Amino acid sequence: MNTKNKLKIFNDPIYGFITIPNALIFDLIEHKYFQRLRRITQMGLSYLVYPGAHHTRFHHALGCMYLMQKAVRILRFKGVTISEEEENALYIAILLHDIGHGPFSHAMEHSIVNGITHEEISLLFMEQLNVEFNGTLTLAIQIFKGEYRRKFFNQLISSQLDMDRADYLKRDSFYTGVAEGNINSERLITMLNVVDDELVVEEKGVYSVEKFLTARRLMYWQVYLHKTSLVAEQLIIRVLKRAKELTKQGFVLPASKALSYFLNNDIDKSTFTKEVLDVFSRLDDYDIISALKDWQHSDDFVLSNLCQMIVERELLKIKIKNKKHKKERLKEKIEELKDKYNVSEYEAQYFVFDGEITNQAYQRKKERINILYKNGKITDIVKASDHLNLKVLSKPVTKYYICYPKDKL
């Protein structure tokens, strides 16, 4: 009988060799829901700024699992009891934590579907996989939802110092070439411990945490909230919104079956059934890119221009300031566009708009990063650190942007 070898090894550019711990994890990775992540970029349209940023959610999920394996080994070495069942559930939960991301990630949440986040879609995927895998994901789902009695398990999946952030900062730094984000994630994990079922960082790890938070702040300003990435994402949102509007008006736009389904139907949390999930699982970046290439030749002025901007990287001009832009400036730009191209005010607002962005590297009120001293005392990182910037990093910084066309569309 020909049996498949499920003890595979991935060669990762960040960590080297990543081993698959068991056959169940292998089967989950092989599943079509997970394989789809190969076709979802980790950083959306950031490659328009950083040409190397073409890595995928698939890369990231495997990296997170690798770090979780390391975390389990370290915590067990320090005397924290983790059963084999719990260990496996941690691997499954972190592996599938991003499985609900759609094409170009956050852009999709504001256009193709409404009122449902990628985390909620991830949970729907996990519940469906749990049915297919005869209930073997039940504990992983409990941990993912934060319902398991051991709180630190969920903190390893989703907190201010989780395996998700530990991987994406280092990975995104590597692929963009932005050295400021290159954290020592493996040292951070080596400094982890557990007290009263909550995650803490040993005193020796204070400087690693400082570097982690500083790197997070810099990566947000330099990469995730880079003005070109920001305007490109806004254009994708507007493309999909316009396509949906035109479809409702009776226009037939060329699109894949999966994309057509979401253009023709209003999907929210209450209507996200198993059938919708199956269609969603067939939707990826390629559907959107293919549609952009077709729609740039559309008869609709708005849709064709928005698509052309992205395809040809002739994006809108964007200005970011610390203060809100005057509404008169926005109105002035809208009037200019109306006169120049004979479009309605509603259509002009697709090309002229404003908004705000916020960066907060550390949220003290949410869930703290606690430092464990040798005498057993536990203190929040801001108090434990002599880094003056950490207090500043825990305050949200808001900036305001305005977008409008350059000289001509």
Image (cartoon, grey):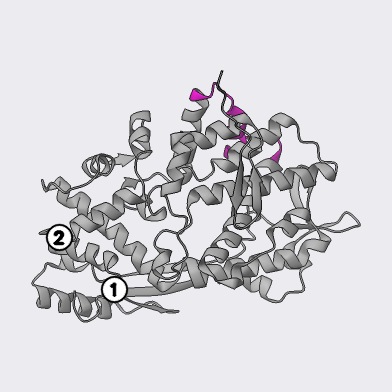
- Please identify the residue farthest to the top as the structure is shown: 1
Q: Secondary structure at mark 1?
A: loop
Segment tinted magenta in the rendering:
132-151
Q: Secondary structure at mark 2?
A: loop
User: Badge 1 is on which residue?
Assistant: 316
Q: Three-letter amino acid code at disc 2?
A: His
Residue in the image at 63% along x and 39% along y: 20
Residue in the image at 67% along x and 75% along y: 389
User: Residue 260, position in %: x, y?
Assistant: 23, 42
Q: In the rendered image of this protein, does residue 35 appear above or below residue 204?
A: above
Q: Marks 2 and 1, Cα distance to the nearest angstrom?
A: 19 Å
**On the rendered structure, is 7 left or right of 396?**
right
Residue in the image at 13% along x and 58% along y: 298
Q: Three-letter amino acid code at disc 1?
A: Leu
Q: Can the viewer see residue 195 in this picture? A: no
User: Residue 46, position in %: x, y?
Assistant: 42, 65
Depth check: give the residue in front, 107 or 132. Answer: 132
User: Badge 2 is on which residue?
Assistant: 297
